[in-house]
Image (spheres, grey):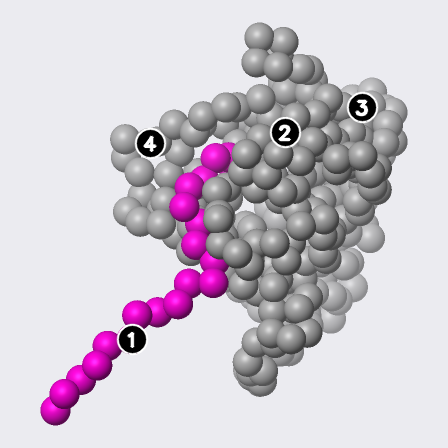
Amino acid sequence: MDYRKIELRQEFRVEAVVSVHYFEYMNDFNFPGERHNFWEILCVDKGEITVTAQDTEITLRKGQLIFHKPNEFHNVRANGVIAPNLVVMSFCCCSPAMSFFENRIVTVGEAEKNLLASIITEARQAFSSRLDDPYLTELKRRQDQGFGSEQMIGLYLEHLLIQLYRRYNTLAPGPQVHRENPQKKDGETYQRILEYLDANITRQLTIEKICHDNLTGRSQLQKLFQSRNGCGIIDYFSRLKIKAAKQLIREQQMNFTQIADALGYTSIHYFSRQFKKITGMTPTEYASSIKVLSEPQKDIL
């Protein structure tokens, strides 16, 4: 038989990655702005920011993503109240279809969030550079780089671009796939308990209390959180509290004692020990490190 091969078309081809960042900014962060000859995407993971794209000032909220085209001036600043978490990635892509994203703001769903998270995960495997340094100008490869990590970053980025293009271009819809989730009940239970934990972030909870309030067995609860997070529910709740503490520190409206009290810790000393256990830093060290990252480095700018 005479077989003929078909070379696969590439609507988007990411030639290079310039930066991959995940930032936890203070509530007064202000990046003065820049322009460069490659694409950049910025996604708000938490909070709210003001972005300038060329001459237009835009407010972006959680779940929104903006594209900055090559040579477009752009800056970003926090609103002085909410400390934002941002995903920022820049890359080179000369594919004609990129013109679709010029001057475009999109809302990301769970699928896109998972792709962004996968890129960050692979970037940590591929590069030794800090992903929370806004003034980083060059990524450094790890000597013990994970196999295929750089390629996976490109593939995930291309997947993200295709997915957003399909969603927002009504002339290019993707395939409609309908799957029935066999773990729907577990998923609903897990989501309900996450909401319960968020609602009770200021309290001291025991596993017995969580089980009682959610009509769930102890073994089922532990198994559910172990499979999804690699830890038990109390460990997860502790991490959730520290995540909230980090947010409050960056918003600069409360001192450490007030934060510890607001989150239901029995003492500032216990709060500090838990904070260091989970983050590797004391609350003071964390506040200082974030503040340093928020200050422009004049020798670079």
123 in the magenta segment: no
Inspect this view and state whether residue 45 appears: no
Instruction: Give whichever of 40, 111 is nearer the camera.
Output: 40
* Vertical side of 67 occupied by 73: above or below: above
The residue drawn where x is 69% and y is 20% is: 294
Instruction: Report helix, strand or loop for mark 4.
Output: loop
In the displayed orientation, state which residue is furthest to the front. Answer: 96
Residue marked by disc 1? 6
In the displayed orientation, state which residue is furthest to the bottom. Answer: 1
Q: Earlier in the sequence, mark 3 or mark 1?
A: 1
Where residue 170 sits, quadrant-wise, is bottom right
CA–CA distance between discs 3 and 1? 53 Å
CA–CA distance between discs 4 and 1? 36 Å
Instruction: Give whichever of 70, 144 is nearer the camera.
Output: 70
Residue marked by disc 3? 28
The residue drawn where x is 12% and y is 91% is: 1
Identify which amino acid the numbered label 2 is placed on: Arg
Residue marked by disc 4? 142
CA–CA distance between discs 2 and 1? 39 Å
Q: What is the chief secondary structure element of the magenta stretch?
A: loop
Identify which amino acid the numbered label 4 is placed on: Arg
Residue marked by disc 2? 35
- The circle on residue 63 is none
Q: Are marks 2 and 4 in contact (CB under 8 Å)?
A: no
